[in-house]
Image (cartoon, rainbow, N blue to C red):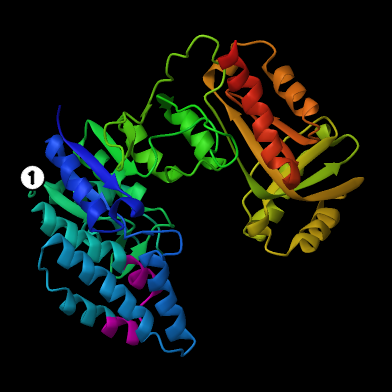
């Protein structure tokens, strides 16, 4: 096999013992040439992630609160890693530079990125790989917009000079050299960009779970693992709350047709989940691939007589949301009715203001908002060719006494999204899982 790119998340680099596991994994697989690392995560439940501590330092400085004690905790964490790994990378010089930049008013992006930066230096020294600063190869424009083509060329050009290297995830730089970060979890994106640029055979994403499960194990007891899943199915599940992989990390490898393998650092012999371009062959009786969902939505139901014949209605509606910088999540509709699904965090307390604008510009006959809503997606290519899937899902929810507030089925017919009240969220997922997975396993 050719080159692999392996990304190791926060739990996989939380302490020296975890990083030693990475070395064992790489020793057993000589194809892993490029390694992307996150900042150290939690070592135990009450612990703090290094990135959170760095953000806290920045917040303290902005509010003129002493930050030195928090910064010392960060320094001691990395010095312990340095000592326990048996490497010497002169961390004190790095700490002094970071502290100097903190006190000079460095950006939150710069401060937050230092966890990945320091960790990559340590891991590179421990593995005896080259270190490549992500700010040299991940590029953003002056407004902070990611520059895809320039980044792809920069990565390919730089990695020609390194047979093996460790790259910090999560950040890059603007054209003027200032640090710019992706959203939280962005190390997944960095790994995918590296894999695409070198044409990797596989992008391995190592975390603390053995791949994807068909449902959230915090809700469903012992859900079945997914051996293989397609990019499209994963995109749907990631968007709806499945949190193993950052949803934007799928795109770079998808367009290059590079499979993603989700693996468990603590159980390296587990095959994990393979994510591919084509859907997997389903097991006998299997209809769905997985179930995912999340809380925190508002559904605005609009009724207007003769709505279907009114030109420009949806354009005006979308314009109102654009003016408020709100993304439209879903818009299921009927002949005279239309529902608008929005994230509560995007609304940010402006619901009355938005409703007033809808009333003024759209002139509906009736409008009603349902807050505290949850969305649940049932996903799988097997749904498109099976009659009775919707009936089975709705029957399961009815028997569980879950009231469905909204229904939306994608044009690909590989997903059905239902909106339920937050209080029914867990019960609804259990009911769907039992109907499509547990029930089939018992047959």
Would you say 219 lies left or right of 159 here? right
Could you say which quadrant of the image residue 78 lies in? bottom left
- Front residue of 286/151: it is 286
Could you say which quadrant of the image residue 180 lies in? bottom left
- As drawn, 301 above or below 276: below
Determine if residue 310 is in view: no
Q: Residue at x 17, y 63 (%)?
A: 84
- As drawn, 106 above or below 167: below
- Front residue of 345/55: it is 55
Q: In the rendered view of the protein, which quadrant contains the C terminus?
A: top right
Q: Magenta stretch: residue 73 in it?
A: no
Determine if residue 283 is in view: yes
| Residue where numbered disc 1 is placed | 163
- x and y percentages locating residue 210 in the rendered image: 38, 35
Q: The magenta stretch spans which residues?
A: 99-113
Q: Residues within 10 Å of mark 1 (few under 14, many from 20)?
A: few
Q: Residue at x 47, y 29 (%)?
A: 232
- x and y percentages locating residue 140 in the rendered image: 34, 59
- x and y percentages locating residue 437 in the rendered image: 58, 21
Q: What element does badge 1 sit on?
A: loop
- Front residue of 361/382: it is 382
């Amino acid at each position: 096999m050719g080159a692999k790119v392996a990304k190791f998340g926060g739990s996989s680099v939380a302490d020296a013992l975890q990083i030693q596991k990475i070395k064992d994994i790489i020793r057993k697989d000589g194809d892993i040439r490029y390694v992307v690392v996150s900042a150290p995560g939690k070592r135990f439940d009450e612990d703090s992630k290094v990135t959170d501590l760095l953000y806290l330092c920045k917040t303290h400085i902005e509010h003129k609160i002493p930050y030195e004690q928090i910064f010392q905790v960060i320094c001691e964490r990395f010095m312990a890693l340095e000592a326990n790994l048996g490497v010497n990378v002169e961390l004190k010089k790095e700490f002094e530079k970071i502290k100097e930049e903190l006190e000079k008013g460095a950006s939150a992006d710069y401060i937050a990125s230092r966890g990945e930066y320091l960790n990559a230096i340590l891991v590179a020294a421990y593995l005896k790989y080259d270190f490549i600063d992500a700010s040299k190869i991940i590029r953003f424009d002056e407004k902070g917009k990611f520059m895809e083509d320039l980044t792809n060329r920069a990565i390919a050009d730089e990695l020609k000079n390194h047979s093996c290297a460790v790259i910090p995830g999560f950040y890059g730089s603007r054209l003027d050299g200032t640090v710019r970060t992706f959203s939280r979890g962005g190390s997944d994106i960095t790994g995918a960009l590296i894999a695409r640029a070198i044409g990797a055979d596989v992008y391995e994403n190592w975390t603390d779970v053995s791949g994807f499960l068909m449902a959230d194990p915090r809700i469903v007891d012992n859900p079945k693992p997914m051996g293989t899943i397609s990019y499209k199915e994963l995109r749907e599940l990631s968007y709806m709350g499945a949190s193993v992989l950052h949803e934007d990390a799928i795109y770079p490898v998808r367009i290059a047709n590079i499979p993603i393998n989700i693996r468990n650092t603590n159980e390296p012999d587990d095959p994990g989940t393979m994510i591919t371009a084509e859907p997997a062959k389903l097991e006998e009786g299997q209809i769905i691939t997985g179930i995912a969902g999340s809380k925190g939505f508002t559904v605005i139901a609009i009724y207007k007589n003769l709505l279907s014949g009114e030109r420009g209605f949806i354009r005006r509606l979308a314009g109102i949301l654009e003016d408020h910088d709100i993304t439209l999540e879903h818009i299921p509709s009927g002949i005279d009715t239309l529902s608008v699904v929005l994230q509560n965090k995007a609304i940010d307390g402006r619901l009355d203001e938005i409703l007033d604008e809808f009333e003024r510009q759209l002139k509906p006959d009736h409008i009603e908002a349902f807050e505290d809503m949850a969305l649940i997606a049932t996903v799988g290519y097997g749904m498109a060719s099976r009659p009775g899937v919707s009936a089975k899902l709705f029957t399961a929810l009815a028997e569980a006494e879950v009231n469905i507030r909204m229904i939306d089925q994608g044009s690909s017919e590989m997903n059905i999204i239902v909106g339920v009240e937050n209080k029914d969220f867990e019960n609804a997922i259990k009911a769907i899982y039992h109907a499509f997975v547990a029930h089939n396993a018992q047959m």
